[in-house]
Image (tube, grey):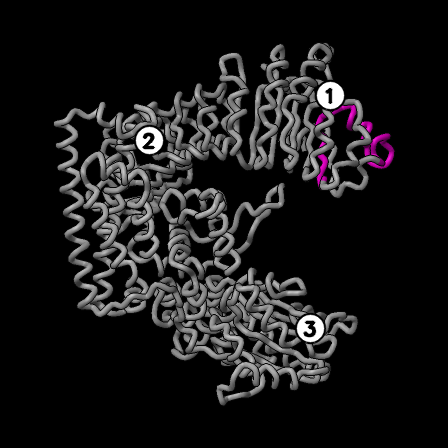
Amino acid sequence: MESLAVTILEKLSSAVYKEVGIIWNLKEDIERMKNTIFAIKVVLLDAEAKANNHQVSNWLEELKDVLYDADDLIDDFSIKVLKRKVMAGNNIVRQVQIFFSKSIKISYGLKLGHKMKAIQKRLDDIAKTKHALQLINQPMENPIVYREQRQTYSFVSKDEIIGREKEKKCIKSYLLDINAKDNVSIVPIVGIGGLGKTALTQLVYNDNDVQRYFELKMWVYVSDDFDIRKITQEIVGDDKNSQMEKVQQELRNKIEGKKFLLVLDDMWNEDRELWLKLKSLFMEGGKGSMIVVTTRSQTVAKIMGTHPPLLLKGLDSQKSQELFSRVAFGGLKEQNDLELLAIGKDIVKKCAGIPLAIRTIGSLLFSRNLGRSDWLYFKDVEFSKIDQHKDKIFAILKLSYDHLPSFLKKCFAYCSLFPKGFVLEKKTLIQLWIAEGFIQPSNDIRCVEDVGHEYFMSLLSMSFFQDVAIDDCGGLSTCKMHDLMHDLAQLMAGNEYVVVEGEVNIGNRTRYLSFRSALESAPTSPSSFQLRTFHLVGPQMNASNYLGQSYVLSFSKLKFLRVLTLCGLDILEIPNSIEQMKHLRYIDLSQNPILKYLPPGITSLHNLQTLKLSECSQLRILPEDLNKTLRHLELNGCERLTFMPQGLGQLTNLQTLTLFVLNNRSTSVNELSVLNNLRGRLEIKGLDFLRNKNAEIESAKVLLEKRHLQQLELRWAYYVDFHPWSLPAKRAEEDNKNWLEDEMILQGLQPHHSLQKLVIDGFCGKRLPDWIWSLSSLLTLEFHNCNGLTSLPDAICNLVSLQKLCIYNCLLLEERCARRYGQDWPKISLIREVEILPMSPSLLKYFT
């Protein structure tokens, strides 16, 4: 809620709205709305803390409705102004006066003013009610929910811990290291709530070897209240609230020269300076002293740890079942009941190896003394819901959520729209957050995608995401959400977010919808017209999914959509009426393999930031004059795309362009020269069409300034109409004719030295340009179908970061670089991964 209020205030304070106020004489209305929203904003944290009160809860729901309506109206303003700017140039005030006749201008101003006053009245009523509800100003976020209910201690029976032998051994090896050089070392244990970080630490703490090794052992439960004096008081046993000077002196006296073990349980503090102040108090301990820190945050581990963090994972299925049986059956005869055991296994799967979840559910079933039918009902009905019995789990998991700032809570809740186990692409998630306005603009030079990256990393470090995958450049590419975290996201999302798998039945307050059914059943009722997100992701359906004009006219009534996803539906055509959905920032039409064209109306979407068309394998052309607001254009797997539209070079905000196709009809490759904000991956295809134009590209240096580009794929046409291991005379003749031109083309395509992956495919040259050997950050280098290359130069040793070299269907290179006996093998033998094949892996699978 607070993030939405902040977004509206920022929009109303922008230069666009100052001009709106001048053009339509609404300056006073805008100021009044700003002041009212600000007055409400400062009590939001107090209101959300009191949301259990029915009146306060209703007040928040009414406020949310009016804020969404205000945001939609404000967005309408900006669309009007942006549209005129696109049509008329940059002098907005002067040009709007030209385009609007006096009568039309007055009429529109009155209409606009009427809508603003209606929203203002609703805001005024809400502002008055806040006094009756006794809501107080609370500008600083300090969420402490459930934490006071939970205290930890140092003892735990070793019989209660299952499946942690390996982790215990690892921690002990750190603690009992007789070669430790530092006076104090720090071992972090990281994992989501409920995994058993505290229990594992207790087990190690009470181990006989550990007890004997350390002269002094201390345990402090820290949680989010990182108060140095309180922590120190607890260690020394001071209950008199003494001054810090006295307490720290007592601590020094207590630990001086002694080898101690200190556990700081449940750490949340990410302020490095505060940690260093606390750490300095322990430096007089004996050599080999250890501090064990348990935390959910990898950031905390990074700040504090001197050892690599132990990333705690869930128990395997066998250990999970063992723990469940021990708790749920309690050694009774029921544990031999095969049917109950089978039901129990299904229940245990839901717990995903989290000991806390397993224990809570097992204890619940044990305490109820239930029979088989009851267990089935529990599995199929009760356990599928979030009820009061599950609060024991969520009271722990929710600790992490309560600790988030409001803008991250919104981002986390949005993830509830995806199915459990869904592989979340980091880049896509950030694009969605941006489209929905969840990312707060930065005050520095960082772009909004960089801020979104920080949001993602914050959620990851707090263990909201897991199972991270790394791309070829060493960056985070995908992740998943734990099922219980997904349940938490759904709980926190409330009725704003709805996932529908059958007949559509959504409420008036639903704004974000994920729909998993046939396209014809998609929502078109008035209750859905306030939607901001609509996700419709197939399994592949029938190829008859033509998005008919009559249907889309109804579908386009969802006029406040910011996000539209229609993936994997075999859509044949998108009608031009999509232009009516003027608020759209994000469109994903990926994996529609029979979609051939996009409607020209898509260029009328003046807010469009992201257009995803990956795996639309039949897509032939893109519309001319794509909107300049576009930031991400994804074309992976668009194999039939034959040329790029005119005006692409004017899209100076473009950060993602995965494919640039050249042919005789295409725009010039020099269109790329001004797109210096490009990031990630770029594939340039059809470089053979630059032959006879090599002087032009050599002088342009179209890639040299693209410092954010990570992966570059340079492809000439290469037709595999023969066996890949043979080289016909005709092909060899062509290659000999083109080798010099190709060398000049490649020379002119020099990228920035920060490039991390380079693929060269179909190059006919005999010699590689020197710039390749100066790519100091290059991690992966691939050569495909480069039959003119005879050897690799000694300069390949200059690629100090190179981790992977691939050579596919390069006949002479294959022989020269053959493992052990090839003449060039000594030059590449130290590269960690070398792959040499007679064809690319994508073709090789057809021969094996």
- Depth-wise, is mark 1 or mark 3 nearer the camera? 3
Secondary structure state at the residue bearing disc 1: loop
Q: State which quadrant residue 728 falls in.
A: top right
- How far apart are the alpha carbons under marks 2 and 3? 59 Å
Residue drawn at 69 percent across, 12 percent down: 738
Task: Determine which residue is flagged by label 1.
Answer: 787
The correct choice, above or below, for 694 with respect to 109 in the image is above
Q: Residues within 10 Å of mark 3 (few under 14, many from 20)?
A: many
Q: Check the image and report above or below for 414 versus 654.
A: below
The residue pinned by badge 2 equals 605
Identify the mark nearer the N-term, 2 or 1: 2
- Tell me the quarter of the image containing the N terminus: bottom left
Residue 65: % across, % down:
23, 52
- Of discs 2 and 1, which sits in the foreground? 2
Q: Quadrant of residue 723?
A: top right
Magenta span: 802-826
| Residue type indicated by callout 1 | Asn
* Callout 1 crowding tier (Cα within 10 Å): few <14, some 14–19, many ≥20: many
Q: Is residue 820 magenta?
A: yes
The spot of residue 423 in percent (x, y) is: 49, 48
The 10 Å Cα crowd at callout 2, few under 14, some 14 to 19, many 20 or more, is many
Tell me which amino acid carries mark 2: Leu
Q: Position of residue 701 (x, y in %)?
A: 61, 23
Q: Secondary structure at mark 3?
A: strand
Left or right, 278 with respect to 13, comes to right
Cα distance in 3D space between marks 1 and 3:
59 Å
Residue assigned mark 3: 184
254 relative to 508, above or below: below
Q: Is residue 194 left or right of residue 724?
A: left
Which residue is rendered at x = 49% and y = 71% of the image?
356
